[in-house]
Image: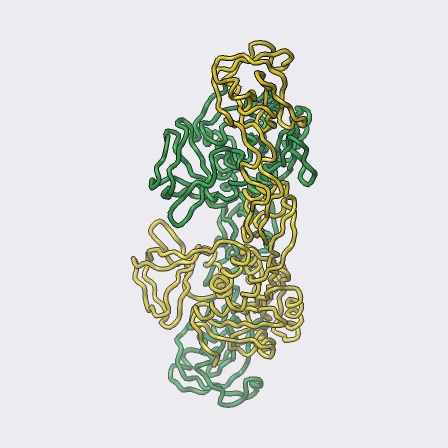
Chain colours: A green, B yellow
Amino acid sequence: MTPQRSVEEHVDHVTRLLAPLTAEPGVEAVPLTEAAGRVAAADVRSEVDLPLFRNSQMDGFAVRATDVAHVPVALEVTGDVPAGHEVPLVLAAGTAIRIMTGAPVPSGADAIVPVEDTELVLGRDDDLAGAVVEIRRPRKRGEFVRERGSDLHRGEVLVRAGTRLAPRHLAALAAAGVTTVDVRERLRVAVLTTGSELATPGESVRFGQVFDANGVALAALVEEAGAVVSLRASSDDDPETFARVFDAAIAASDLVVTSGGISKGAYEVVREVLLPRGAEVTTVAMQPGGPQATAVVDGVPVLCFPGNPVSTQVSFAVFLRAPLRAAAGLPELPTRRIRLTESVRSVPGKRQFLRGRVGADGVAPVSGPSSHLVAAMANADVLIDLPAEAEAVEAGADVTVWTL
Amino acid sequence: MTPQRSVEEHVDHVTRLLAPLTAEPGVEAVPLTEAAGRVAAADVRSEVDLPLFRNSQMDGFAVRATDVAHVPVALEVTGDVPAGHEVPLVLAAGTAIRIMTGAPVPSGADAIVPVEDTELVLGRDDDLAGAVVEIRRPRKRGEFVRERGSDLHRGEVLVRAGTRLAPRHLAALAAAGVTTVDVRERLRVAVLTTGSELATPGESVRFGQVFDANGVALAALVEEAGAVVSLRASSDDDPETFARVFDAAIAASDLVVTSGGISKGAYEVVREVLLPRGAEVTTVAMQPGGPQATAVVDGVPVLCFPGNPVSTQVSFAVFLRAPLRAAAGLPELPTRRIRLTESVRSVPGKRQFLRGRVGADGVAPVSGPSSHLVAAMANADVLIDLPAEAEAVEAGADVTVWTL
């Protein structure tokens, strides 16, 4: 008899097994244009002040505040600074320089008068030679001037280590001239499905065969949780075949996930190959997903899920989603308490994860408990988590649900 | 004077402009292995029953229920059906056939007795020749037998049109032998940033230049919202340059987004080029993000945002995120009501979108209102939405926040 564990105990066991993967992640430099969703590996400090230079917040005229203290006042227009103007200008006392939003404020100027508070009394918008502007509203020193470094000073932290890079972080990094950023390497996860009954997708299925639902589902689940699939393969129940793909998976991956081959039947290839390599096979007091195994082979953690498609997907949600999301810097998917709209029965001693769908009235189960109901599971959006001690839960009671 | 609109009016205007993009989406067939996150373009019906054949839910022995009504009873073992066994077997009355989970139930058998309720009294697990099994627990007709079609019948819908394909949908499709699926084409969105002040990322910045924060941010925002970036380019304030990249963008895209060049300055390239092509330039009563423009050029909708990095990002969040997510089948990002932890002032007549950060006590602004504070915005996780009529909101009041 294999030892029996509670769900909580197996969650703790798996979490400990995977802890080294998140404790010291690898680091890679990626271009900013490919960094969305990645996790900063270290604090990124700015090498520049932001803004880079003192610039105008408005389209208007750069002036000395003292020259516009009493309005209206007419000032000679001695220059024009469009955005991107590369020659620093100097403002003389008693004059004005036209300026566009974002353009460098001439030295000597200490305020911007927005264009709507001005009128050209000599000259034209498209020909400022000899122009004179009338200023109609006073502006205080510093008004509409963005000082250099007023957003961030050189040496300050732009993005903290551990931040998942959202568009707003990329904007700040780009503004500071950063073009590559050190991010955590994504975990490389191998997905191995097992079973002599598995047909190759796209080929015709022979009597007794089934199409492999777990390969595509596990690969998508792994990527949705922020990791990359390093290798995806299917093996029949021949130990030599499985050992071959397993060794390739170990060599290419930070983590290996298998489905099938770990229960009590006569042809359990994962169990047969991995027990001699240190696997721990256990029965977790849950339904579906009871048979579970783990191993560490050549330093690589291995998680073995049962092969029924529903069991595989529930196992991923309960044991692997949270550690993968944490490693990828993704937020935890919180559980919720929702009203159950139909009474359900449960097997005492086993924690039940029913497939459920949330509606306006609460959550209802969408299929029977059997772990082969893979089409029915597609209609679920949550798992209904019934405690191990429950024999039945009545309609109207609050239950815990996990987002799928 | 350009016409002034409320935020709600401009949201409605943009929504109408983009409606044709979502009403009749293009369709493409993609392999199931690349379909995660895509949206099914039509109902997918199963061409097979699921399960494909009557199979065992347990490792054990296939029997006739009538033969095990009285236990213990010894039955001759006349065969062995591992999973994937391709030869249909027939069970004779008064005999048993060993069977593995998922293996086809022999015709004649109508119940499975799990292995733990049996013992081989003659023969061995690895040699069933002449074996006899003792059955110790009766099982009713149908117990542990998964009937063909009990999950889904041929012709029934596996996945509804409009479903965003999650791993559980891929599992169901794969189980039914589906290898490619018709999905909505992703919207192709061009991102054009404008301004003679924009320096090329990675090159040194000259006096008066700034690094382009909007290109990388808009591209990441577009992709996060489920669309693809068809073209990304930057233009200076020369109308010929802008017209050239704009025409390339129109030719390659379902939607074009620009930043900069639409306010009241002397060098407003987007305004200058697009007004003669039917653009509608408006001022929306909001801060930041007031100047806005839209056009439809050669049937392609064009959204023009102001160029300050904060204004650009806020404009995307307020006007473009929701329609892009809807087109991609992504759920709406709901707004929430949260307690404000600090009093804030607002400009009456303009709806304010302050950058805020949510903590345990509520939400606090993380920077001043000025639209150049791109580094400060990186620390925000929400926009605090202050109504147009508000002049001040006191600490402790509930405010609406938008998730960034």
Residue at the farthest top position = B122
**x, y (%) of residue A214?**
59, 37
Q: Is residue B139 above or below residue B218?
A: above
Instruction: Decide which of B91, B344 is in the foreground and name it.
Output: B91
Taking A345 as reference, is B198 left or right?
right
Instruction: Decide which of B280, A278 is in the foreground and name it.
Output: B280
Q: Is residue A263 above or below residue A93?
A: above
The structure residue drawn at horizontal position 51% and vertical position 21%, both measured from the top left corner, is B65
Task: Mark yes or no: residue A26 visible.
Answer: no
**x, y (%) of residue B174?**
61, 41
The structure residue drawn at horizontal position 63% and vertical position 15%, both measured from the top left corner, is B126
- Total of numbered circles in the picture? 0
Residue at the farthest bottom position = A122
Taking A73 as reference, is B48 left or right?
right
**x, y (%) of residue A303?**
55, 31
Instruction: Decide which of A180, A112 is in the foreground and name it.
Output: A180
Instruction: Decide which of B147, B185 is in the foreground and name it.
Output: B147
**x, y (%) of residue A331?**
47, 45
